[in-house]
Image (cartoon, grey):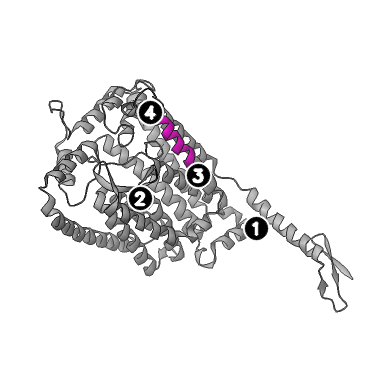
Amino acid sequence: MSQEIDGIYIRESLDGRPIEPKTERKKVKKATKKRSEDVVTALKSDPYIWGIYLLLVLISIIELYSASASEVVGTNVYAPLIRHGMFLGIGFVILYLIQRIHYGYITRFAGAIGVLSWLALAYSTFMGVEINGAQRAFMLGPFTVQPPEIVKLTVIIWLATILAKNQMRHDVKTSGIVYSAIVVAAFGGLLALNGLTNTLLVMVVSVSMFLICGIPLRKICIVIGVYGVLFGIFYVCTKVINRSSEFDKVGQTEQVVAEATGGDHSLGSQTQINRILRFLKGVHPEDELNDENRQVIMAKLAQARGGVVGKGFGNSRESVRLPLAFSDYIYSIVIEESGLIGGIFLMILYLLLLARAGYVAYNLNRALPAFLILGCAILIVFQALVHMAIVTGLFPVSGQPLPLISKGGTSVLVMSAAIGIMLSVSRYATRQKEGKSARDNDEARHLGDDMNAINASADN
């Protein structure tokens, strides 16, 4: 006797139990595997996120060519652009590979990635090399690795995993909030040794994720209060430790270099206070140009020269005189060449990335992918806005690259990885309109039982 199952005949024994020959079992497995593969191969990453990424890369290539004028050595005027293009190419490969991997695999190793990133940050803080007056990097062969850039993305992945695992209906378990606060404090303490900007960036992104996952405002205020107390204790301790070295001549020389280049310095030094005082004082036309105000004045000259429509791509004049025009102040070169219109267009481009991430997140079934895509988008956009605010004089001077546009290998690779995670979420996460489907079951299998919390928007 035999019966047909999915087009395959299965023989039965006299007592009615099926007898499956090896060839027939293989056919069943092959058919099941093919149906599963069909579900995956039919998926596509979000085209709007792809489009924004490619536009940012194109702008980066154009603007860095002009902004790197001060770096040109010898006859090879394309050397800085070639190096930056190499990192953009590696970043594209990283992005492409990540967006082909189910985001669930990335979150499985969130803890291990977090611990390794913290160790790398600790190593660079205490035994690393100095860049722009801050000890925040280490050498890996011929390349310079900056763990503070890696930490930004690491914290998002780890927080998204913790919050999704402890997600309740419009709230998060107290244990999840405590674990998340500990993660942010552990990274923030080390980041603060090299400057406040990255520390504040990580804390703002973490608070944004707390709001997204539905934690009540009362609990968030408690967490912020704890952050404030820890920061105060840390500041006092660092001030006491550094008091003996404040009048050291070598330290004073390094401090002047840091202030002139816009790099972050240690929390306990006078550099941060001096920057805030100079920011409050502002710059005036009659001020004498010196190492302390050179960045600010040259950046403002570049923006004033750009006007409304700009001087045209490749026609920047201030890039030769503006220190770090290719990294911390590249937005001023963008405005000089494309004017106010180009500067606004670039800002809108970043905001569109956040808007698209919000749209995708709102329509997802599960909380984890929503936290991931929004966390990555908030990191990229907020860092871009901080960079723009510093260049335009709204924030005190501090080193912060413009995502995917400023020169900097580690920053380009990390931001490319963040875009890759966003594309992976848009590719594999199930939407509310799909309901219970083969794709939904496939996502549940990748995440496991403890990571299948429902997205708050789907629970309304």
Classify residue 268 as left or right of residue 203.
Answer: left
Q: Please name the residue that numbered disc 3 is placed on.
A: 95
Give the mark, 4 or 2, whose residue is nearer the N terminus: 2
Q: Nearer the viewer, mark 3 or mark 4?
A: 3
Give the mark, 2 or 3, whose residue is nearer the N terminus: 3
Quadrant including the N terminus: bottom right
Q: Amino acid at mark 3?
A: Leu
Residue 147 is labelled as 2
Query: Between marks 2 and 1, how big is the CA–CA gap?
Result: 40 Å
Query: Between marks 4 and 1, how big is the CA–CA gap?
Result: 45 Å
The reply to whether discs 2 and 3 touch (Cβ–Cβ < 8 Å) is no
Q: Please name the residue that numbered disc 1 is placed on.
A: 438
Look at the numbered disc 4 and give the secondary structure of its residue. Answer: helix
Query: Between marks 2 and 3, how big is the CA–CA gap?
Result: 19 Å
The reply to whether discs 4 and 1 touch (Cβ–Cβ < 8 Å) is no
Q: Residue at x 31, y 60 (%)?
A: 186
Tell me the crowding category of disc 4: few under 14, some 14 to 19, or many 20 or more residues within 10 angstroms, Cα based.
some
Q: Nearer the viewer, mark 2 or mark 1?
A: 2
Tell me the crowding category of disc 3: few under 14, some 14 to 19, or many 20 or more residues within 10 angstroms, Cα based.
many
The reply to whether discs 4 and 2 touch (Cβ–Cβ < 8 Å) is no
Q: Is residue 400 above or below residue 33?
A: above
Look at the numbered disc 3 and give the secondary structure of its residue. Answer: helix
Q: Nearer the viewer, mark 1 or mark 3?
A: 3
Is residue 163 one of those drawn in magenta? no
Q: Residue at x 41, y 30 (%)?
A: 81
Q: Is residue 200 above or below residue 5?
A: above
The reply to whether discs 1 and 3 touch (Cβ–Cβ < 8 Å) is no
Q: Nearer the viewer, mark 4 or mark 2?
A: 2
Start-end of magenta stretch: 81-91
Tell me the crowding category of disc 1: few under 14, some 14 to 19, or many 20 or more residues within 10 angstroms, Cα based.
some
Q: Quadrant of residue 258?
A: top left
Q: Residue at x 13, y 27 (%)?
A: 288
